[in-house]
Amino acid sequence: MASLITCPHCGVRPKEEFTVRGDALPQRPASHAPDEAWHAYVYLRDNVKGVIFEHWHHVGGCRRFLVVERDNVSHAVLSVTDAALFRRPDVPGEDAQASAGKGLA
Amino acid sequence: MRYSALDIVRHAFSGNRHWKPVWREPQPKAHYDVIIVGGGGHGLSTAYYLAKEFGITNIAVLEKGYIGSGNVGRNTTIIRSNYLLEGNEPFYEFSMKLWEGLEQDFNYNAMVSQRGVINLFHSDGQRDAYARRGNAMMMHGVDAELLDRDAVKKSMPYLNFDHARFPIMGGLLQKRGGTARHDAVAWGYARGADQRGVDLIQHCEVSGIRRDETGRVLGVETSKGFIGCNKLALATAGHTSVTGQMAGLRLPIETHVLQAFVSEGLKPVIHNVITYGAGHFYISQSDKGGLVFGADIDYYSSYAQRGNLAMVESTIEEGVSLIPGLSRVKVLRAWGGVMDMSMDGSPIIDKTPIDNLYLNCGWCYGGFKATPASGFCFAHLIARDEPHYTARFLRLDRFERGLAIDEGGKGPQPNLH
């Protein structure tokens, strides 16, 4: 049910301690990147049905940003990682985003 | 078949055994002028207005479940047009006007009840914001009335006026707002479309969109085989990203689940639709007596048609905070529906980069009230290839052009809208 989140720093905590920021996969473009890249980063989402990666902010605990891997149909939580240690997996759509980012760096 | 009082009497004397199904169950043809994916309120109203107002009748509506199984049967049935921004208000007022004539128009009892929608305010700043919204509504020719505390107390004495943190200082009332019977809206549109020759094809799930080498849409792959079309229209809110993906579209949408609740039947007590300004809670009473209420989405994205318990608790807390008498009311049913949360909280009715693919999505959790105008404007767009005047701001490219319609001023954060 995604009711309990195992924070790597604080242990098992209720989900009400967290704020959900949204999709963790889009990569922030360089500040001088063209408008299209920023539009894609700020507004467009893959919004897949299935396993997703989301930024959760542990505001009621360690205040760290975490990446929660979650199934948005079964609501099962698959993994929780500190955002600083998160490595983006090879998922469909990632290539396009990564190359868009690279071209602009 | 038109319904009449005489029919009801005649059928009553024959034991109500001779009513006929109100729409056909056709097999799909090989090709249609227009295919509408999604047999919810918006898809059905689009088909209805395409046939009735724009003279296109060679249409199929493809529904993966049965008619009325999605969000059109999963909402809190509120209709209103009390928006602030120019991009929204004329559109929702157009919808309100269509609601007012709907039952005569499609000869079906949709139980449209203009019982009034009141938004309560609890601080000076909120009163000013609601006064501004009321003024904006009146500038567009829409009724709005700012009530003070005494006026609210007179008609809704059961509210918690002397709340320690959120005292009720008044409310913004739209008298023409109210509720409608959501299932009947779906059935009325379905029947009206069917009568005009539209094929409603249920249990037909679209699994792919077939396009030629130039990118034009040829038709859709479905669980009942390939069906060709000249124009393809998506009205699949909740799953728009999934169907959009079939055509390679990446959209400004995240899918979230919203819960709604119904209590046991009570004697008439709540005569209007009331929204709580200190949180996000709305309540009305159905004609059967059940209190119908809801609050926020569940905050994390979800494609499951069920919600989490934390939001159930939060919703009930808000309800009791507003109406202390609710504390001993029993909740009978709760359910969840998945919805397109757009990046500015406003919908999209637009063409896409693909020539003959049309998009109707992003309804967040305000889609029910928009059902008539959404269908009308989408039909207008499909038939004439240009937007209806009231929907001209609801464009897909408004985000990249810096023209977001952000009613709540919350920014590109779908779970906050």
Image: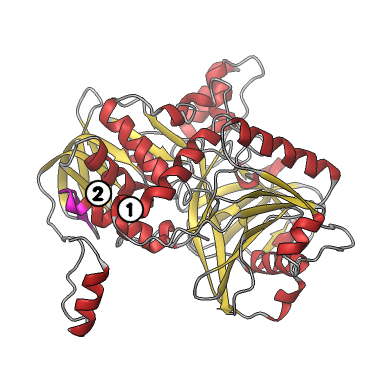
Q: Which residues are magenta?
A: B194-201
**Which chain is disc 2 placed on?**
B
Residue denoted by label 2? B61
Please determine whether, in this image, residue B156 is positioned above or below residue B59: below
**Which chain is disc 1 placed on?**
B
Amino acid identity at mark 2: Val
Provide residue B413's location: percent of width, then percent of height.
Answer: 63, 40
Work out how far the residue at label 2 is from the one at label 1, CA to CA, in angstroms: 23 Å
Amino acid identity at mark 1: Gln
Residue at screen point 77% across, 54% down: B278
Provide residue B255's location: percent of width, then percent of height.
Answer: 51, 49
Tag 2 near tag 1, CB within 8 Å: no
Question: Helix, strand or loop at disc 1?
Answer: helix
- Location of residue B67 by image quarter: bottom left
**Who is closer to the viewer here, B226 or A48?**
B226
* Left or right of residue A53: residue A47: left
**Who is closer to the viewer here, B402 or B40?**
B40
* Left or right of residue A37: residue B317: right
Label 2 CA crowd tier, 10 Å (few <14, some 14–19, many 20+): many
Q: Does residue B410 show up?
A: no
Provide residue B258's location: percent of width, then percent of height.
Answer: 55, 58
Residue denoted by label 1? B104
